[in-house]
Amino acid sequence: MLWDRFFSKQPLQPSIESRTEAQMAATDYDLVIAGSGIVGLTLACALKQSGLRIALVDAKPQTAGLEQRRAYALTLMTGRIFQGLGLWQQILPRITTFRQIRLADEHYPAVVNLNPIDLGTSELGYVGEHYVLVEALLNALQEAQHLTWLCPAAVTAVDYQADRAIITLLMAGQTQQISSKLVVAADGARSSIRQWAGILTQGWPYWQSCVTAVIRPEQPHGNVAREHFWESGPFATLPLPDNRCQIVLTAPHAEAQHWLTVDEATFLAELNRRYDGQLGQLNLVGDRALFPVKLMQSQEYSRPRLALVGDAAHCCHPVGGQGMNLGIRDAAALAQVLQAAHQQGQDIGSLDILKRYERWRKAENWIILGFTDLLDRCFSNRWLPVVMVRRLGLQIMRQARPLKYLALRLMTGLGGRSPDLAQMQPTQGE
């Protein structure tokens, strides 16, 4: 397992310093993925048998993602994509499957419980930790014959030409250039590659930040995912293995900073107040972290020789836990478009090809960005007419199964176009 190799410090690939001259001379690729986070790795994994020559470039070491302990809500669609990649048997035993979503508005008694019967499925989603997903993806890429790792290496410039892109890298203090038919920016919300290309974005920073932490409650979490809305912002609880929970507390910037820095007892007392004591005594596991949130949508997802995926293309409010899932769906969609074009002998870096991906994903992402923005603004609001309308909506949702079904289709990722990967079954032995 990759995890064992990581802790035994066995190198997965030759380091930049140990590469031979012959290896360094092999600089031409069909596809360069800038960013080896979960989205970039998912794209590489989806294309590992396509015959495309791929380079993965990241400023961090190849195993850096194994050190991260942040957790994500994973939609049913994400689970199906990972199953199509042959990773699900490795991932599923190490994550939590939840079969209930509980929605509540402060102390209002009309709590909405969403269950699998409302959607016609056996579960509603999953919660997985970052390192578990990264380990499965890296394991799957170990035998990829057409994949080259260039890590750590920083992209310092990209020159887009008619038939290729020239990428300048800084590796081990030396500058090197490689060429590729296509560059995929998977380098995050502050994507340098997007900015160098002059692609503009729309959106705004929110007035809120999120405090994340992992707790272990005295009472069993029951594999229930909770979204509890408060005046300051949403408060999410994601169930993890070993009766742990990751919490995401959203609040105005100053209040969020306060909850980041107060002593542990005061912080846990605030969480217990929000749970109304239902989870019993709480213990903090690890450190708290804070991050600001914003809504962002790139005006273009593609240019000739360039495609954007994940946070490089869009960001949304964390309410509903949709962000990482959108990026994974981007990767699956782009892989499908590129593989089809490659099989037909088409230029994968041409704008006509890349616009197929953009038309597919941009509209669907707009729906989720708008949905999460509406949720946050409606529920982080004390204006009486808004309060009355949203609480009426909760009352109706408790009784109206069609409304629950539509909400769950959106929340689970099943409402959009399904990539071919999500309809595949892993081959025997994977």
Image (cartoon, rainbow, N blue to C red):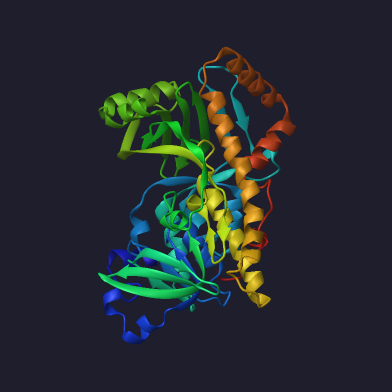
Please state if 318 lies on the left or on the right of 395 as rendered: left
Q: Quarter of the image holding residue 83?
A: bottom right
Residue drawn at point x = 58 percent, y = 54 percent: 329
Query: As rendered, which of 335 and 116 lies closer to the eye?
Result: 335
Query: Does any portion of residue 317 appear in the rendered image?
Result: no
Q: Is residue 2 above or below residue 319?
A: below
Residue drawn at point x = 59 percent, y = 60 percent: 332
Which quadrant is the C terminus positioned in?
A: bottom right
Please state if 265 lies on the left or on the right of 194 as rendered: left
Residue drawn at point x = 35 percent, y = 72 percent: 12
Which quadrant is the N terminus positioned in?
A: bottom left
Q: Is residue 172 above or below residue 303?
A: below
Q: Residue furthest top?
A: 384
- At which x and y percent is residue 383? 55, 15
Q: Residue furthest bottom?
A: 22
- At which x and y percent is residue 380? 50, 24
**Number of marks:** 0
Query: As rendered, which of 124 and 356 lies closer to the eye?
Result: 356
Query: As rendered, which of 47 and 75 lies closer to the eye?
Result: 47
Query: Does any portion of residue 398 appear in the rendered image?
Result: yes
Q: Is residue 324 above or below residue 419?
A: above
Q: Is residue 35 above or below residue 272?
A: below
- At which x and y percent is residue 311? 48, 50
Q: Quarter of the image holding residue 3?
A: bottom left
- At which x and y percent is residue 367? 63, 41
